[in-house]
Amino acid sequence: MRKNVPSRCAVLLLAAMSPLLAQSPEALSQFFEGKQVAVKMDMPATQQGADIYPQRTPSLDLNSYSRRIKQFGAALRTGDSVMITKVRVKEKVIEFQLGGGGYGTLGDDTDESVSVPQTDKSQREKDLERQIKTETDAETKKRLRRQLDDLRNERERRNQRDRVLAQEASEAKKQRIATKRLQGGSRFNIRYEPRVAAEVLTPQALSGVLSQYVAFAPEMFSGSDSIPSGGSAGAQNQPSPGYSPNSGDAASSLRKGMTREQVESLLGKPNEVTDKEQAGLKVVTCTFDRRDATIRAEFVSDVLVRYAVSSK
């Protein structure tokens, strides 16, 4: 039976990652927030957004995505340009909020119903009911029952009018909320295992995870912006001295967070594949021989976590 208690190695690995986890949220916020991107898919008009699982294929949870699009409609359409308004790191999810993050957050009214209190029995009705029970004269009892029926009918007419008004108000409120949903933006929820969170918590890796669904401006990752202040893009991801990106080699397009399938679409099939266990994780190393360079790429759960380029 599989145990839920993590191994000692895994615990040590998480402890080693803790400084990075403490710094990376601020780096992500500084790097992404306030910048414009274009979405490559319709985005649900709800704060629930779209769920991304980088370690799955496909990474998009299509079931929940289809359900939310059908229920709430689309706040963002394919090709729309939108601002990244918030990047929030939680225990097992990164919220990548667009145009406000989606309607339904704290303070948003999501209750589409409007209720109107129904009129209860009046004291006169209650008195008549008691009199009818004790009255022995047939004519008097008949007269009292007519009075009681009139009061009941009038009360029910008032209640019926109030129910119609409440229904109309609910429909109007439903339309107002639907309009606000379409104006409230949306979000991606990138869900990951804590033990690989350190590899995900870099701007380059996060953009790689979302590259199938979001178009980032090339200038976001050029010049001094490629490694934001407080970021954690390690030197192991820089080409070795003597390697020139102008050679046209596809290795210049590599980014942490890419899937193995994406890497192989750039570099072709690896010439050599090896695997090893490191701190309780299976690390797969793929070696690609290019015309003027050799690229070694390491993957955890088919996610690129580091690579090195050496010139021939």
Image: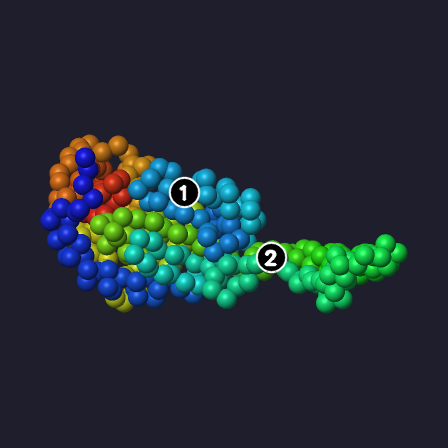
Is 72 above or below relative to 232? above
Q: Secondary structure at mark 1?
A: loop
Q: Residue at x 71, y 57 (%)?
A: 163
Is 263 above or below relative to 170? above
Q: Residue at x 17, y 47 (%)?
A: 6
* Horizontal side, residue 310 vs residue 218: left or right: left
What is the x, y in percent for residue 284? 19, 38
Q: Are marks 2 and 1 in contact (CB under 8 Å)?
A: no
Q: Nearer the viewer, residue 34 or 17?
A: 17
Which residue in the protein does label 2 denote?
Answer: 112
What is the x, y in percent for residue 112? 60, 57
* Horizontal side, residue 58 vs residue 129: left or right: left
| Mark in the foreground, 2 or 1 | 2
What is the x, y in percent for residue 280? 14, 44
Determine the image quadrant of residue 259. top left
Amino acid type at circle 2 is Glu
Amino acid type at circle 1 is Leu
The tally of labels here is 2
Is 76 above or below relative to 67? below
Q: Nearer the viewer, residue 37 or 118?
A: 118
Q: Quadrant of the C terminus?
A: top left
Sequence-wise, which precedes: disc 2 or disc 1? 1
Which residue in the protein does label 1 denote?
Answer: 60
Q: Is residue 247 visible?
A: no
